[in-house]
Image: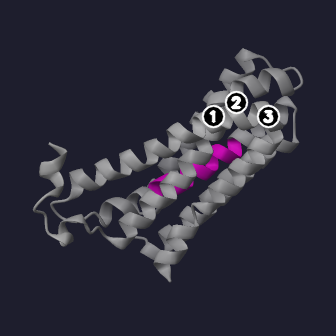
Amino acid sequence: MLKEQFIGRNPSHFKINPLVEAFILSETFLWSAWYFVIPILAIFVVKNVKGGDIQVAALAFSFYLFVRIVFEIIIGRYLVKKTEQYSFIVTFTGIVLLSASYLGFAFFHSILSLFLSYAIMGIGLGIASPAKNALFVTHLDKNKEPSEWSIYDAVTFIGMAFSTALGGFIAAQYGFEFLFIFASILSLFSIIPYLLYTR
């Protein structure tokens, strides 16, 4: 079956829009950084946040989701009829905020700072997601949409799988603070493919 997918295909069959490529690479960095952190964040809350427990960890994550929902709705309506350049700016801003939220986990260990970091995370992804997803769907190659979505899923999920396992190792060997700083830097790398595209 795989052989049939590759043999006899023209080289143009495998080419995809440069912005779609940039999006896939960016998302791989972004979600790899995310999966360094999220699967073990509850353990961090219990062990490192003063007064933290499983209930606090769950409530804080729910708080992040509500914040993200609010900002996704707001920015989704705001981006209607905006230029592509404006969507890039919004995407970059959201990614920077997301990266800053990881640093909040690294350096501040109170319940208040935990919720603040989750709020920044929700705002970051809340404004970045509609902008970057709109860029992606409007540049999908005609008649290749399913295959390009599948490539996106395959590449990003490979990154997630490796980063989840590696994140646990890094946290165990070097500590949570190092892990969060590393995740923040990796998250910022997700801006680079867009910058290369715009150049």
Please report the bounds of the magenta region as a residue range.
119-131
Predominant secondary structure, magenta span? helix
| Residue position marked by numbered label 1 in the rendering | 38
Horizontal relation, residue 170 to residue 177: left or right:
left
> Is residue 10 located in the magenta-colored stretch of the structure?
no
Position of residue 192 measured from the top left corner of the image (x, y, whole percent): 57, 69
- Dot 2, how many residues are within 10 Å of its Cα: few (below 14), some (14-19), or many (20+)? some
Position of residue 52 measured from the top left corner of the image (x, y, whole percent): 82, 21
Q: How far apart are the two marked residues, 1 and 3, measured between alpha carbons?
A: 17 Å
Give SS at disc 3. Answer: helix
Q: Residue at the location (71% across, 16% down)?
A: 55
- Whether residue 18 is visible to the viewer of this picture, yes or no, is yes
Q: Residue at the location (73% across, 46% down)?
A: 102
Residue type at tag 1: Ile
Position of residue 91 measured from the top left corner of the image (x, y, whole percent): 54, 62
| Residue position marked by numbered label 2 in the rendering | 41
| Residue position marked by numbered label 3 in the rendering | 173
| Above-or-below relation of 22 to 147 | below
Name the front one of labels 2 and 3: 3
- Dot 1, how many residues are within 10 Å of its Cα: few (below 14), some (14-19), or many (20+)? some
Q: How far apart are the two marked residues, 2 and 3, measured between alpha carbons?
A: 16 Å
Horizontal relation, residue 5 to residue 185: left or right:
left
Q: Residue at the location (70% across, 30% down)?
A: 41
Give SS at disc 2. Answer: helix
Among the 4 quarters of the image, the one containing residue 107: top right
Say how the picture is coloured: one colour
- Image marks 2 and 1: residues in contact by CB distance under 8 Å: yes
Residue type at tag 2: Leu
Image quarter where the N terminus lies is top left
Give SS at disc 1. Answer: helix
